[in-house]
Amino acid sequence: MVNISSAGTFKLGDRTVKRLGYGAMQLAGPGVFGPPKNRAQAIDVLRTAIEAGVDHIDTSDFYGPHITNQIIREALHPYPDGLTIVTKVSARRGPNAEWLPAMSREELRSAVHDNLRNLGLEVIDVVNFRSMLDIYGPAEGSIEEQVTVLAELQQQGLIRHIGLSNVTARQVTDSRKICDIVCVQNMYNIANRTDDAMIDMLADEGIAYVPFFPLGGFSPLQSATLNEVAARLGATPMQVALAWLLQRAPNILLIPGTSSVAHLQENLAAAELQPSQEVVAELDRIAAAV
């Protein structure tokens, strides 16, 4: 049995979670749209993750839409003690699987209630506001109104904690004037290190950073160095990329996703990789070469 506790823990609001969690996006159909090809397999993945000690699941009701949260509820409800479920709001899916902004007050309120209903919860542990000012990456602009809506829902007892996604450092600073921010979820990996300064700032403040697309996402990272290091360590490139993230900063929480039990176990095994300083230095040079 893989020991994911080897990677340590970090605070997520008032919860302490293991640093290796699970991202549920791939439980939906192709393009994160429609039902999975094998619903029973999706349920098995979730139950296996919990059995392996995962206590942090990242999801959203716009995965599917609705389907991923419904599968989580079917697989795990009533939820085990200590499980932290994080969702995100501010997008909707078009009829052709488009990712569309849904950032109005009413859309945000409706999204929170959709998450509550489909997950079978009375309160959500963490709701991330994902900025859709630019769907392809962080873009400057005010998100004060949207964060204020979530803060109001928090005061009503529907949300325990608030996080941010796809945001700039300035937006994090401005949002913290409205309410406590417990995590930031942005794209970051061994080759895409735009958020280096933000990660260090958040670490100093005790705020979690949750990178998505740890190996490039829809455009997989191509790195001969990563492949060579993985071969030397007897690991996969994804395992090495995850292990590099774990050593990068203590506040990094990982949520690799998969719809395969075998791939899930492979991802979780990254917790036991301990790359040497020499290997880390070698991997650090990947970003400079991109």
Image (cartoon, rainbow, N blue to C red):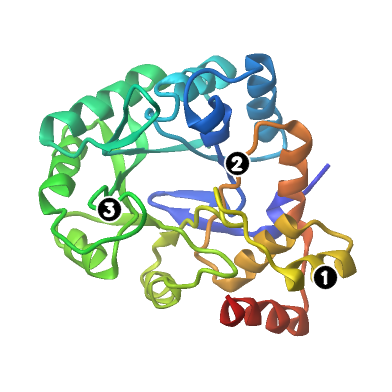
Label 2's element?
A: loop
**Residue 228 numbered mark, or none:** 1
**Residue 134 numbered mark, or none:** 3
Q: Residue 153's image quarter? A: top left
- As shown in the figure, which amino acid type bears the numbered disc 1? Glu
In the image shown, does 192 or 170 lie closer to the viewer?
A: 192
Mark in front: 1 vs 2: 1
Q: Are marks 1 and 2 in contact (CB under 8 Å)?
A: no
Q: Are marks 2 and 3 in contact (CB under 8 Å)?
A: no
In the rendered structure, the answer to whether residue 173 lies left or right of residue 53 reads: left
- Residue 54 seen in the current view: yes
Give the residue pinned by disc 2. Answer: 257
- Residue 271 seen in the current view: no
**Residue 255, horizontal then vertical, whole percent:** 56, 47
Q: Is residue 231 above or below residue 57?
A: below
Q: Is residue 258 above or below residue 213?
A: above
Label 3's element?
A: loop
- As shown in the figure, which amino acid type bears the numbered disc 2? Gly
- As shown in the figure, which amino acid type bears the numbered disc 3? Asp
Q: Residues within 10 Å of mark 3 (few under 14, many from 20)?
A: few
Label 1's element?
A: helix
The N terminus sits in image quarter: top right
